[in-house]
Amino acid sequence: MPLLEVQNISFGYGHHTPFEVQAVKDISFAIEKGECVAVIGHTGSGKSTLMQMLNGLLKPESGQVLLNGENIYQNKKTAAKARFQVGLCFQYPEYQLFAETCAEDIAFGPKNMGLSPEEIRKRVLLASEIVGLPADKLDVSPFDLSGGQKRRCAIAGVIAMQPEILILDEPTAGLDPAGREEILSMIGRYRKDRGATVLIVTHSMETAAAIADRILVMNGGRLVLSGSPEEIFSESEALLEMGLDIPSFARIILALRSRGVELPSAYTLKDAARVLSDGLRGGGRL
Ligand SMILES: Nc1ncnc2c1ncn2[C@@H]1O[C@H](COP(=O)(O)OP(=O)(O)OP(=O)(O)O)[C@@H](O)[C@H]1O
Ligand SMILES: [Mg+2]
């Protein structure tokens, strides 16, 4: 049984108004324990709406969300429980930091779970260690942190609930390249060390390829492609039509491979540089 199974879910906003929009249309997919899945799609394709339906926040208008085989929207209690089991870190989560200190902010979720003060303290320390938030920042106001640190603090608040699935909605949006790299390697470590199940929403193909086992592509509220980074990247024309693009270095590698040049796949800049320089050194095949 998959850890999470989404069956034919749909959701629309503003029904019976001129602003009616069908944000998610009949989407189905499943996620196995330990998988890292990236959800990619153009602005407004329904990614955030979909994520909110996975953790008990937004009830689908039709279809079901099954966690460990159980419908999370069975009743109010199961929906409330799903908020702890499926931890969702919102897009621009730093806007939701509110407490006087980072420690209090990170403790918010665990407190709502009704855990003991000792357990809460333990979880706050562990979560801040996982995200790489220095211990001396715990007593500081979250508003005094840098952009990257704020993001880590917000992610720590979700990790502290020790959810079965961690969902990160655009965790690197608005950060500079160094901040982006730090957040991505933190997520990679979290996965590797804990065998965690992670769902990550991103606009960036390169981010998706760098981190995910599988990529889901959304377009106009529908799930239009699902596959390994290699499978998704080989659909470059379909992606271009949806306003998505694969990085040019990945395109070069695909073009060389399609002309019979033997190269391993590479969908991140670092890997592509390595593959191409190895290719150039290796007997002049390039
Ligand atoms: N609270 C809301 N009220 C009305 N319409 C909404 C609301 N939230 C989203 N929408 C609309 O639903 C559609 C899907 O939006 P959603 O935020 O899920 O997309 P997204 O893929 O996350 O976009 P982005 O990449 O910009 O974050 C869009 O047309 C958006 O305008
Ligand atoms: Mg969004």
Image (spheres, rainbow, N blue to C red):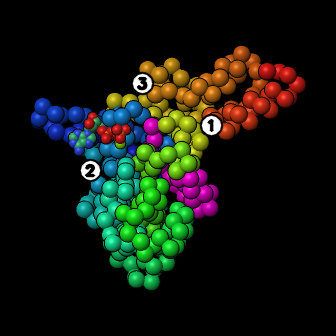
Would you name the residue on which mark 1 appears?
A: 268
Q: Nearer the viewer, residue 16 or 277?
A: 277
- Helix, strand or loop status at disc 2: loop
Q: Residues within 10 Å of mark 1 (few under 14, many from 20)?
A: some
- The stretch of residues the image draws in magenta is 182-203
Disc sitting over residue 59 in the figure: 2
Q: Residue at x 45, y 58 (%)?
A: 146
Q: Residue 206: x percent and y percent? A: 55, 37
Q: For the residues labelled 3 and 2, say whether their Cβ atoms are less than 8 Å apart.
A: no
Q: Name the amino acid, label 3.
A: Met
Q: Residue 177: x percent and y percent? A: 54, 44
Q: Residues within 10 Å of mark 3 (few under 14, many from 20)?
A: some
The Cα atoms of the two marked residues, 1 and 3, are separated by: 21 Å
Q: Residue 257: x percent and y percent? A: 70, 22
Hey, which quadrant is residue 138 in on the image?
Answer: bottom left
Query: Where in the image, quadrant-wise, is ligand 1 located?
Result: top left
Q: Quick check: is the Cβ at mark 3 less than 8 Å away from ligand 1?
A: no
- Helix, strand or loop status at disc 1: loop
- Helix, strand or loop status at disc 3: loop
Would you say 9 lies left or right of 177 here?
A: left
Disc sitting over residue 190 in the figure: none
Q: Earlier in the sequence, mark 1 or mark 3?
A: 3
Would you name the residue on which mark 3 appears?
A: 242
Q: Residue at x 43, y 45 (%)?
A: 174
